């Protein structure tokens, strides 16, 4: 394939899937600016390997795996610990209007999960992947996906459970 045709194919793919990649990246890291950085780094890696990736049957799966691996690799470095983990800004590109309070609670709970648990929950329930597809995307065993998902969901349930307010008694 000629370089110009390959570049046009790559540009078309990225233009059509960048919004989806950005949303997945945001769910992984919890910050729109970091999500943009993750997408940019992943797109760069994808371009370098486009001659191979462009021929795959499931380019979305390959792109998602690159994104998840980039996110997990970032978690192993020390620089990310110095950055703000406040959840970023809520810009108009984040999607349709939703219940903001519930959305913020879920985002906060999701951002509190360890990186691998967060990745499995996002891949399983946002990207709607099977256990085997998630294992393939993360480069681990299906059993690891099951345990990470179970732990992640348990933590989410505990953090999102409404706790009744106990009225103080005055004498």
Image (cartoon, rainbow, N blue to C red):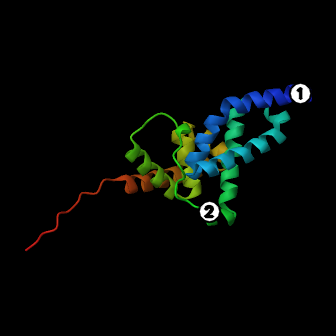
Q: CA distance from mark 2 to mark 1?
A: 38 Å
Task: Please name whichever residue, 67 or 167, is drawn nearer the observer in this view of the structure.
Answer: 167
Q: Which image quadrant for residue 65?
A: top right
Residue 50 in sight in this render: yes
CA neighbours of label 1 inside 10 A, class few (<14), some (14 to 19), many (20+): few
| Residue 18 in picture, x, y percent from top left | 67, 35
Residue hosting label 2: 83
Left or right relative to 7: residue 106: left
In screen coordinates, is 102 left or right of 86? Answer: left
Measured along the vertical axis of the image, is residue 146 above or below residue 127? below
Q: Is residue 56 visible?
A: no
Please, what secondary structure does the residue beneath circle 1 have? helix
Q: Residue at x 23, y 59 (%)?
A: 165
Q: Which mark is residue 135?
A: none
Residue at the far bottom in the pictured view: 171
Q: From the viewer's side, name the closer residue of 130 and 48.
A: 48
Quadrant location, the C terminus:
bottom left
- Residue 50: horizontal and vertical position, in percent? 82, 36
Q: If the image is split into quadrants, where does the N terminus sit?
A: top right
Q: For the point 52% across and 47% down, which residue is it?
A: 121
Q: Which residue is mark 1?
A: 4
């Amino acid at each position: 394939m000629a370089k110009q045709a390959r570049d046009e194919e790559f540009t078309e793919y990225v233009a059509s899937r960048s919004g989806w990649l950005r949303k997945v990246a945001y769910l992984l890291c919890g910050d729109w600016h970091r999500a943009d950085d993750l997408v940019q780094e992943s797109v760069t890696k994808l371009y370098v390997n486009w001659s191979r990736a462009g021929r795959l049957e499931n380019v979305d799966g390959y792109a998602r795996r690159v994104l998840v691996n980039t996110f997990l690799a970032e978690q192993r470095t020390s620089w990310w610990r110095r950055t703000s983990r406040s959840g970023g800004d809520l810009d108009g590109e984040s999607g349709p209007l939703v219940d903001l309070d519930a959305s913020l609670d879920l985002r906060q709970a999701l951002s509190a999960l360890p990186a691998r648990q967060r990745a499995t929950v996002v891949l399983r329930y946002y990207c709607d992947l099977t256990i085997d597809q998630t294992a393939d995307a993360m480069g681990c065993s299906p059993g690891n996906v099951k345990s990470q998902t179970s732990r992640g969901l348990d933590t989410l349930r505990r953090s999102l459970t409404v706790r009744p307010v106990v009225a103080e008694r005055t004498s």
